[in-house]
Image (cartoon, rainbow, N blue to C red):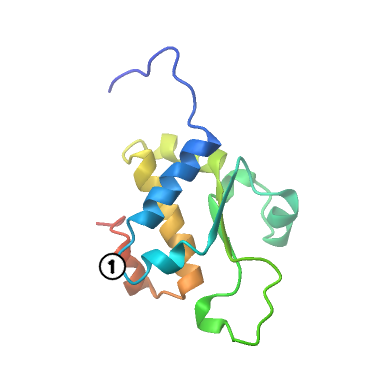
């Protein structure tokens, strides 16, 4: 294993967002274009209210979250209060990446993005596995 450069810094919020956008850009059709309509938001940790709503005490337990109404449940009469959003949480993602040690940061970010988009699209586990080869 190679030691990191002594002046290396932790991946930034911007880098995580860039990796997430790349994951969306490489989705297969017909998912790629609709996925671009979901807002990506990257923060260091989930907001406290979000953790409380999910009954989580440890902010490192949540790497990502889909917030919105899945396409399979939307109606044309629904009034959107805010756009559908995929949240990514940098510090828990980096923590999992370091613990795993056997996947690239791009692979992990892509996995989290695809998992959260699966909620948006209403995908089954079989459909997720067609797009996300994570478990192979």
Q: Is residue 128 above or below residue 11?
A: below
**Residue 32 at x, y = what percent?**
37, 64
Q: Residue at (43%, 34%) from the top-left corner?
A: 98
**Residue 95 at x, y = what percent?**
50, 37
Q: Quadrant of residue 50?
A: bottom right
> Could you say whether the residue bearing mark 1 is in a helix, strand or loop?
helix
Q: Residue at (52%, 33%) from the top-left corner?
A: 12
Q: Which residue is mark 1?
A: 130
Q: Which residue is at the far left?
A: 136
Q: Residue at (35%, 46%) from the top-left corner?
A: 107
**Residue 5 at x, y = what percent?**
38, 15
Q: Quadrant of the N terminus?
A: top left
Q: Quadrant of the C terminus?
A: bottom left
Q: Is residue 98 above or below residue 113?
A: above
Q: Which residue is at the far top?
A: 6
Label 1, residues with CA under 10 Å away: few <14, some 14-19, many ≥20: few
């Amino acid at each position: 294993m190679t030691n990191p450069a002594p002046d290396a810094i932790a991946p930034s919020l911007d880098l995580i967002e860039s990796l997430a956008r790349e994951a969306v850009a490489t989705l297969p059709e017909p998912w790629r274009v609709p996925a671009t309509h979901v807002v990506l938001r990257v923060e260091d940790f989930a907001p406290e209210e979000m953790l409380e709503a999910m009954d989580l005490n440890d902010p490192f337990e949540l790497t990502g979250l889909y917030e919105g109404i899945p396409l399979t449940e939307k109606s044309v009469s629904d009034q959107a209060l805010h756009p559908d959003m995929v949240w990514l949480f940098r510090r828990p993602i980096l923590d999992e990446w370091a613990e795993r040690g056997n996947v690239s940061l791009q692979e992990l970010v892509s996995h989290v993005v695809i998992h959260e988009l699966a909620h948006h699209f209403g995908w089954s586990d079989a459909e997720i596995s067609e797009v996300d080869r994570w478990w192979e």
